[in-house]
Structure formats: structure tokens, C-alpha cells
Image: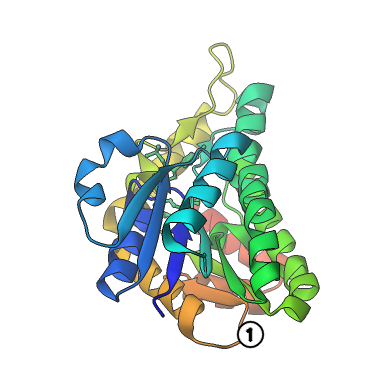
């Protein structure tokens, strides 16, 4: 029987590549996004159905999940991919910006899980693939809020796996390093305060370095491959690194003082 994957944030980047890859391997794909009316070409592809899902809108999550189950009969794999980064000094971020960052990257992801887990439990089968980041294990300057969300996704996922394993539901974490997508431009939100100049030096030195990583990075297809592996390898492996092995190995073996010096040299100096 054909398998079914539901993907959030399927309109661009990693999500879109993931739709294409699963479809090319004969899966049924529930491609969910905030504005399905914009992705008309995707809607024409066989075995791909579009559903409106904004992770900050619980009703849209419920109706997309219901719609996918009605259309395809089940969901086998959930890919929690929707997310974006809020960048800039913490002091410059408004409470509203901070809440939106958590509502999307953390509570949104949790609410999609909340909707799908009962279905997986009833079927005694399912895999949740959460797209975290190398930024869920390490931290760069001026990304304190984005990192907080991705570190939260790491902890949430690592703990969740234990309570779901007896229902034959597995949890997987994908940890991409830099990937060339809309992440560094269209999707990025900048925290700025008109009268706050104290961080300008740090901002001017750091943000171009980050942008350079995005420009020279591989595209989202390598992450889609890792997601596909996580969905199909039949193992209990929790974490999948993509373009992030070097940094995560350094994180593992270096003491904080040396690792932080490395980050400063890459990002600031
Ligand atoms: N690119 C990287 O270097 C990198 C590295 C590590 C991890 N990641 C993670 O990978 C994931 C995908 O990002 P990407 O690189 O593919 O960037 P992207 O091309 O900007 O894609 C982000 C996707 O998330 C969607 N999204 C944002 N807010 C949403 C909401 N409230 N509800 C539903 N969808 C929402 C966007 O939808 P719209 O089209 O409607 O805006 C878009 O489809 C994110 O979780 C990101 O944190 C990216």
C-alpha cells in the first residue's frame, strides 16, 4: 500500500524539495502551507494534494490533518518543517516578535504533533520528523531567539520519543547546517529598534557572515534526502545531521571556551 507523508511549510525551500522527493518515490503527499493558492504548479503534480495549514492557527491544523486523512486514508509520516528565524540583538526584539517566533517554531510544531499523534497511536504506527537545526545544538551571535526555539525542538523531540515508542511511533530530528533557501532573505525577520545603536558594530560584522553561509550553501534537496532516510531507514536513530557534521563534531569534543572562540572567529572577528 502506498505511504502518505504530511509536510508543513511546503511552499518553498526544504519543504518544497521534500514534497518533490517523496512524490518522485511514489508516496502520496499532503503538502501543507499558508497560501496554497500561490503554489498552483505543485497542485497539478500527481499524488500531491495541497492543504491550507498555518502552524499558528489551530483550526487550520485540525482541518488540514482531517483533510489529508480523508483524502489518502491515513498519514504515515509527519514532517514538521515550517519555521523561520528572528535575527538581531535580543534587546531589539519586541515581545510580539518573540512570541511569534515561538508560536511558529515551537508551539506550532507541538500543535501539529498534538493533532497527528492520536491518529498514529490508533494505527500503532507513525514517524514524526522534526526539522530542528545545527542551531538546535550550537549558538551563533544575534540568533538568541531562533536558537531558543530550535533548542526547544531538540529537547521536546528527544523526550517525546520515549513516551511514544510503546505505540510504535518514532521521533526523528533533522539538524541541517546552512542550506540555500528563502530562509536568509524572504523568511528572515530582523529585530530592530530605531534608537538602539549599541549593537551596530556586532550586527555589521556578524550578519554578512551569516548571509555568506546562506549564499554558498547547498540547496534543500540534501535535507529532503535526509528526511527521506529518517522516514524509511527502519531504525531508532534519533538525529540526522545535514551539512553540519564538522561543527557538531567540534561542539562534541571541544570545551566551551575553545568552541566559543571558534564561533567568535567564524562569525565576528
Ligand atoms: N535554510 C537553512 O539554512 C536552515 C538550516 C537549519 C534549519 N532550517 C529549518 O528548515 C525549515 C525550513 O526552512 P527553509 O530553509 O526551507 O526556509 P524557507 O524556504 O523560508 O521555508 C520556510 C517555510 O516555512 C513556512 N512557514 C513560516 N511560517 C509558517 C506558519 N506560520 N505556518 C506554516 N508555514 C509557515 C514558509 O511559508 P510561507 O511561504 O507562507 O512563508 C515556508 O514554506 C525551518 O524550520 C528552518 O528553521 C533551515
Please provide percent x and percent y for residue 43. 25, 48
What residue appears at the point 36 percent right and 66 percent down from the top-left corner?
Answer: 28
Q: Residue at x 58, y 40 (%)?
A: 104
Q: Quadrant of the N terminus?
A: bottom left
Image coords of residue 81 (percent x, y) = 49, 54
Choose between 41 and 47: the one closer to the eye: 47
Q: Is residue 197 above or below residue 163?
A: above
- Residue placed most toward the observer, 162 or 180: 162
Q: Tell me if the residue at label 1 has its CB under 8 Å from ligand 1.
A: no
Residue name at image x 43 percent, y 62 percent: 72
Rendering quarter of residue 97 = top right
Disc 1 is placed on an element classified as loop
Left or right: residue 55 compared with residue 30: right
Image position of 209 (left or right of 37): right
Q: Residues within 10 Å of mark 1 (few under 14, many from 20)?
A: few
Residue 201: horizontal and vertical position, in percent? 50, 32
Residue at 49% over, 76% down: 231
Q: Nearer the viewer, residue 120 or 39?
A: 120
Judging by the rendered image, the residue that carries numbered circle 1 is 236
For the question of whether residue 94 can be seen, the reply is: no
On the question of residue 152 being in view, the answer is yes
Amino acid at each position: 500500500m502506498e505511504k502518505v507523508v504530511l509536510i508543513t511549510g511546503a511552499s518553498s525551500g526544504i519543504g518544497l524539495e521534500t514534497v518533490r522527493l517523496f512524490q518522485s518515490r511514489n508516496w502520496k503527499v499532503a503538502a501543507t502551507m499558508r497560501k496554497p493558492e500561490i503554489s498552483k504548479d505543485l497542485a497539478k503534480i500527481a499524488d500531491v494534494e495541497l492543504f491550507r495549514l498555518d502552524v499558528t492557527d489551530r483550526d487550520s491544523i485540525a482541518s488540514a490533518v482531517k483533510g489529508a486523512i480523508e483524502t489518502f486514508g491515513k498519514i504515515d509520516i509527519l514532517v514538521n518543517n515550517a519555521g523561520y528565524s528572528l535575527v538581531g540583538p535580543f534587546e531589539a526584539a519586541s515581545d510580539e516578535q518573540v512570541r511569534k517566533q515561538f508560536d511558529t517554531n515551537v508551539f506550532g510544531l507541538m500543535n501539529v504533533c498534538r493533532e497527528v499523534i492520536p491518529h498514529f497511536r490508533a494505527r500503532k504506527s507513525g514517524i514524526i520528523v522534526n526539522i530542528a537545526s545545527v542551531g538546535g545544538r550550537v549558538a551563533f551571535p544575534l540568533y538568541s531567539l531562533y536558537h531558543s526555539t530550535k533548542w526547544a525542538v531538540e529537547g521536546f523531540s528527544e523526550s517525546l520519543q520515549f513516551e511514544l515508542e510503546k505505540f510504535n511511533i518514532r521521533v526523528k530530528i533533522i539538524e541541517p547546517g546552512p542550506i540555500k533557501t528563502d530562509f536568509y532573505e524572504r523568511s528572515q525577520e530582523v529585530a530592530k529598534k530605531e534608537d538602539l545603536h549599541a549593537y551596530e558594530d556586532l550586527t555589521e560584522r556578524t550578519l554578512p557572515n551569516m548571509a555568506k553561509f546562506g549564499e554558498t550553501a547547498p540547496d534543500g534537496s540534501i535535507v529532503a534526502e535526509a528526511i527521506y532516510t529518517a522516514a524509511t531507514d527502519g531504525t531508532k536513530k534519533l538525529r540526522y545531521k545535514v551539512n553540519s557534521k564538522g561543527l557538531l563534531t567540534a561542539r562534541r569534543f571541544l570545551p566551551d571556551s575553545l568552541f566559543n572562540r571558534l564561533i567568535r572567529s567564524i562569525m565576528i572577528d
